Amino acid sequence: MTPSIKTAVVAVTLAALLAACSTPARRPLVARKAAEPVPVATPAPILAPPANGKPPADERFRNALGLMEDHRPQEAQAALQSLLKDYPDLSGPLTDAGILYAHAKQRDKALAHFQRAIKANPANIVALNWSGALYREAGDHGRAEKAWLQALAVKPDYPAAALNLAILYDVSMHRPAEALQYYRRYQELIGREDLIVTAWVRELEGRPAQLASAAGDGAAR
């Protein structure tokens, strides 16, 4: 089979994550790979009072984002951890710290920060999307599914979560009917035809017996 190209989706709020190489018959593994460790939370004012006479949280957050943009991840992480020591429940800084840990391949620390970010703000789709990718990478498909479904519940027009969920159903959970549903949804959300995803859709549509069996299993459940 002809190898397909690497696919990537970067969501509106700079959620970066997706895919690896594959053949059309085997979807790419969802990875936490991004082009660069870009900040994912907007540097809008945090509106938290200064802690212990230190500079305001929003100023310190902007400084950390600047370090991330300058590709200085260790300094950025140190700045974020210093900020979080004084303001432990700020969802944006927690998310960015998690992404830096993910890029450094420290999955446990990344997930811990993403979970704190989600607890602070259950509508944080960036942290949910990254959590799903890391759970998927660890083989925890149930938690990955839950994270991406929650992201889509918060923002139904979120393409990254739709595509990640489709790949999860297709490659890892072997639920082709649901994979097909979310591949199509992803195409609708991006408003154009992604030729790689179109190939996957057609490949799934070419297996009507498997789709019928999956639909029957779903009805039985």
Image (cartoon, rainbow, N blue to C red):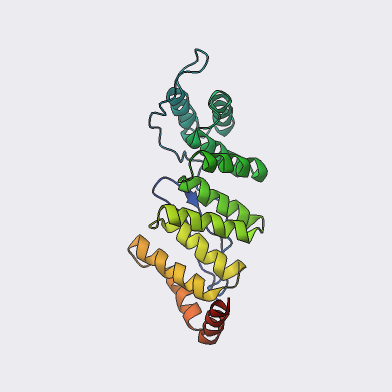
Q: Is residue 162 left or right of residue 188?
A: right
Question: What is the x, y in percent for residue 60?
Answer: 47, 24
Question: What is the x, y in percent for residue 134?
Answer: 60, 51
**Residue found at x 51% / y 60%:** 164
How many numbered marks does the figure carry?
Answer: 0
Residue found at the very far top of the displayed protein: 53
Check the picture and name the quadrant holding the C terminus. bottom right
| The quarter of the displayed image where residue 147 is located | bottom right
Q: Is residue 152 left or right of residue 103?
A: left
Q: Nearer the viewer, residue 99 or 55?
A: 55
Give above or below for 54 relative to 173. Answer: above
Residue 27 appears in view: no
Question: What is the x, y in percent for residue 22?
Answer: 57, 67
Q: Nearer the viewer, residue 13 or 86?
A: 86
Give above or below for 72 relative to 1. Answer: above
Check the picture and name the quadrant holding the N terminus. bottom right
**Residue found at x 46% / y 74%:** 201
